[in-house]
Amino acid sequence: MSGKSSQQDRTRKALIAGLAAELVRPGRLTAERVALRAGVNKALLYRYFGGLSGLIIAFAESDDFMPSAAELRALLPADIGTRSARERFVACLQAYIRALAGRPATVQILLRLHLFDDEVIAALQAGRARAIAEIRTILGAADATFRVDVELSFTLLVGGISQILGHRRDSWTAGERDRDELAQRLSETVAALLCPQPDAPAA
């Protein structure tokens, strides 16, 4: 790689990192703030990405946006293939919670979907579709005993999980919590809701 190409690559990476850092800060997301965070001239953001929307698309197309199947598998129990469909669903969702907790910029993107134009939404959908396809390979074959719409359930739960992780609050009235603590509590809650334990017999 030539010196010029290497510098351009570093600038692109710095801008994507600047975007990720600015997404988790309060206030309006602007090209000026991202460029300042990246330590580069704002004109370079437009030269390489065409503007803030192009930069968000580049982030959506990167490996940092959604967890890969390999990352999720590393977070799953070794015996995942022997478990029931419901247990596999819960385990995949718990792995996803842990992966999202380590991706605060992705969480903020998911919370801001209503703000983006069609081109950005299409890129984000493509990134999400790849992630869902990989999750389906882990979930395996459908099980008639697990009578839920898996995709709708996953979307519903991830929407709520993103709200909690993004705002770092477990209720509207609570103060900010540690993100790892929140992820652990979310993981335990999902398991308790979807795979409840039988009541203990009365003493």
Image (cartoon, rainbow, N blue to C red):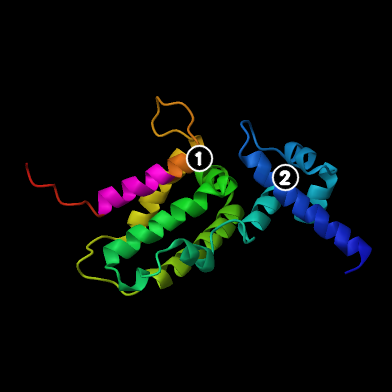
Please state, as top left, top right, bottom left or bottom right, where the N terminus lies in the image.
Answer: bottom right
Residue at 76% x, 54% y is 13
User: Which kind of residue does numbered mark 2 sit on?
Assistant: Gly
**Which amino acid is tagged 1?**
Arg
Q: Are marks 2 and 1 in contact (CB under 8 Å)?
A: no
State how far apart marks 2 and 1 are (Cα).
21 Å
Left or right side of 110 for 56: right
Determine crowd level at label 1: few under 14, some 14-19, many 20+ residues with C-alpha closer than 10 A.
some
Tell which circle, 2 or 1, labels the residue nearer the N-terminal end. 2
Residue 190 included in the magenta stretch of the image: yes
Q: What x and y, as percent, mark residue 79?
A: 36, 70
* Mark in the foreground, 2 or 1: 1
Look at the image and give the residue range highlighted in magenta. 184-194
Q: Give the vertical position of 85 relative to 167 (above or below).
A: below
Packing grade of label 2 (10 A; few <14, some 14-19, many >=20) is: many
Residue indicated by mark 1: 179
Label 2 sits on residue: 18
Does 101 appear in magenta? no
Q: Farthest residue toward the right?
A: 3
Residue appearing at x 55%, y 58% in the figure? 66
Horizontal and vertical percent position of residue 56: 65, 51
In the image, farthest residue toward the front: 203
Residue 90 lies in quadrant:
bottom left
